[in-house]
Image (tube, grey):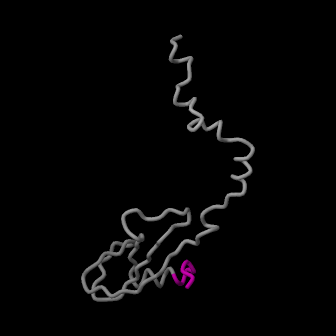
Amino acid sequence: MSKHQVQKSKYLLNPVVDDYNIRDEEFDKRAANMKHISAHFTPTTEWIRKFAWFPIRSDISQKIIWLTHYWKYAIKMDSQGAVPHRANEWTLIYTRQEYITKKLQGEINE
């Protein structure tokens, strides 16, 4: 066997990096008391009614929406605590019929 296979890396022996040195009873007690991000922050979503002056495509059915009202579903933070990186929110475009269908199915609670 070569010397490199038997010996641990110096990087892993570093007490800052070595995960086993950090995880002690005190760490376990603190970890047990930690709350999920949803306990501190509720996911924010909102429905915005807009008018399509220019053609826009629905994200659900891929239909063209033009010269009528449509609904924009804006998600600021999802249920896992993830936030959008490229913009302030994730958006989904719904036609009027798709919005009414979701409302009748009880998926929208406003």
Report the span colored magenta: 103-110
Work out whether residue 50 or residue 103 is closer to the camera in this orientation and state it: 50
Residue 31 is left or right of residue 4, and the answer is right
What residue is shown at x 56% (from left), y 17% (from top)? 6
In the image, is residue 40 part of the stretch drawn in magenta? Answer: no
Residue 30 is left or right of residue 2, and the answer is right
**Residue 63 position in % (x across, y down):** 32, 76
What residue is shown at x 36% (from left), y 64% (from top)? 86
Residue 82 is left or right of residue 85, and the answer is right
Count all numbered tags in the image, as a single digit.
Answer: 0
Q: Residue furthest front?
A: 15
What residue is shown at x 58% (from left), y 72% (from top)? 42
Q: Residue furthest left?
A: 54
47 versus 28 height, above or below:
below
**Residue 50 position in % (x across, y down):** 36, 86
**Residue 65 position in % (x across, y down):** 31, 81
**Residue 73 position in % (x across, y down):** 44, 77
Work out whether residue 40 or residue 26 is closer to the camera in this orientation and state it: 26
Quadrant of res 17: top right
Work out whether residue 58 or residue 74 is closer to the camera in this orientation and state it: 74
16 versus 26 height, above or below:
above
73 versus 20 height, above or below:
below
Q: Main secondary structure of the magenta part?
A: loop
Quadrant of res 55: bottom left
Dividing the image into 4 quarters, which one contains the C terminus? bottom right
